[in-house]
Image: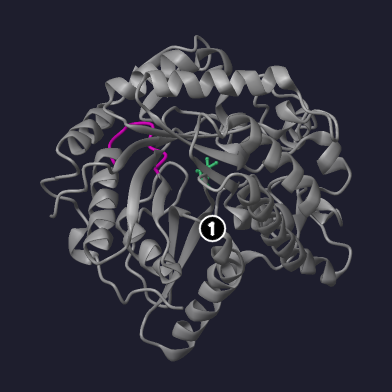
Amino acid sequence: MTPFPKNFLWGAATASFQVEGGIENCDWAKAGREGRVPVCGKACDHYHRFREDFALAKRLGHTAHRFSIEWARIEPEEGKFDEKEIEHYREVLRALRAEGLEPYITIWHFWMPLWFSESGGFKRKDAPEVFARYAEYVVDRLGDLCTHFATINEPYSHVVNGYVRGTWPPFKQFPYVTAVSLPNGNATTQVPYKNWWGFLDFFTVANTLARAHVLAYTAIKAKHKDIDLGIVFQVFLWDADNRWYNKLFARFQTWNMTTRFMNKVAPFCDSIGVNHYFYRRFGSAPKRDVSDTGWEMYPEKIYDSLHLLNRYKKPMYVAEVGVADARDVFRADYIRSAVEGTNKALEEGCDVRAFLYWSLLDNYELALGFDKRFGLIAVDFDTQERAIRPSAWVYKEIIEGSGRIDSSPYASTLRRDSVGG
Ligand code: BGC
């Protein structure tokens, strides 16, 4: 394996609501109070313990850290921004810099202020303008301490879970959802659409998110030429056996779930963050082990995700790969395989600049609550004690050997031609 470049960034990712604690004025907190998703409460209390957590990340050899800004803290009322909360994130950025960790900010990661969700969220007609105003404020106030920003995390996770499967706020469910079923929701809270055409929300909300990104990008770049601004996209990787109709379906889904959206936003991205969790093969498919979330594990397929998005010829960051594994029996191999897939993509010409594991800490895994443990660092949610998992030391060795690894279980399955689209 060719060594990674010297300035390649290594680290982990978190997101505000999942780790900070104490956020009560957003749609997910309300859904928790109503019993539709687990209550998040204090989470990891990272809002107060971020210094301690960054010191651990540094001990683990990390050189970068991805985190998100909580919109509900920054703009608690429509058009009113909270200086005190911006100052909090400035402190967070200073703490990262003090530990030598390069920050990568996600401006919006799934949850929204109540005033926005209650007035329609991304179905509001003026949602792109409202979002762009918030995004611009964030970069205006934090851009002197951070260079790398992404406007939106995983637009399709919000759209599919919120408006098709109905497992995340606003819980809209299309009755025939099994074709896009990805098992990360709790199945008790959905509200079926009254009419079949409710399903069109899937397209309208996705289009609105694309417009929100483009508007925010244009406004921000007009003022901040040197900021690296992009989006973080989760590739749902579709593949097929040799049957023509399966191949066709895989190609359609790749277009439907990736290129249709990315074609619109990529011209307005300086870089692209790539998240990888899911691979599905239509037709005959060999079975893999499953993680604690019940997801089959295909870490090496980050390789295909990177190749798929390399058509846009932008620098890319692996912004999330990760596994829920409370016993820590799969995680080290999972990371090895994902690093190897990333390395091979890099060797073959993809401009990959970072590898960020999801997640630094065990945290609130959305509709699945606190049992699904993705952390390099285990968290006891009663005492808030942190304990470094053995796999985190393996990751450290990989980082210090600049990504050189002895073996990964799935290396032989890496192949460039495996995805449709
Ligand atoms: C999201 C995270 C989430 C992780 C594991 C990604 O889709 O960005 O918020 O916790 O996957 O499900």
- Left or right placement of residue 174 versus residue 125 in this view: left
Main structural element of the magenta stretch: helix, strand or loop?
Answer: loop
Residue depicted at x 61% and y 50%: 221
Whether residue 324 is in magenta: the answer is: yes
Whether residue 396 is in magenta: the answer is: no
Residue depicted at x 72% and y 21%: 83
Residue 364 coordinates in the image, percent (x, y): 56, 31
Residue 248 coordinates in the image, percent (x, y): 49, 85
Image quarter of residue 356 = top left
- Residue 111 makes an appearance in the image: no
Residue depicted at x 26% and y 59%: 346
Which residue is outermost to the top? Answer: 383
**Residue range corresponding to the magenta coloring:** 322-330
Instruction: Tell me the residue that label 1 is attached to.
Output: 269
Which residue is outermost to the bottom? Answer: 244
SS label for mark 1: loop
| Colour setting | one colour
Which residue is outermost to the left? Answer: 406
- Residue 30 makes an appearance in the image: yes
Q: Of 405 and 262, which appears nearest the observer?
A: 262
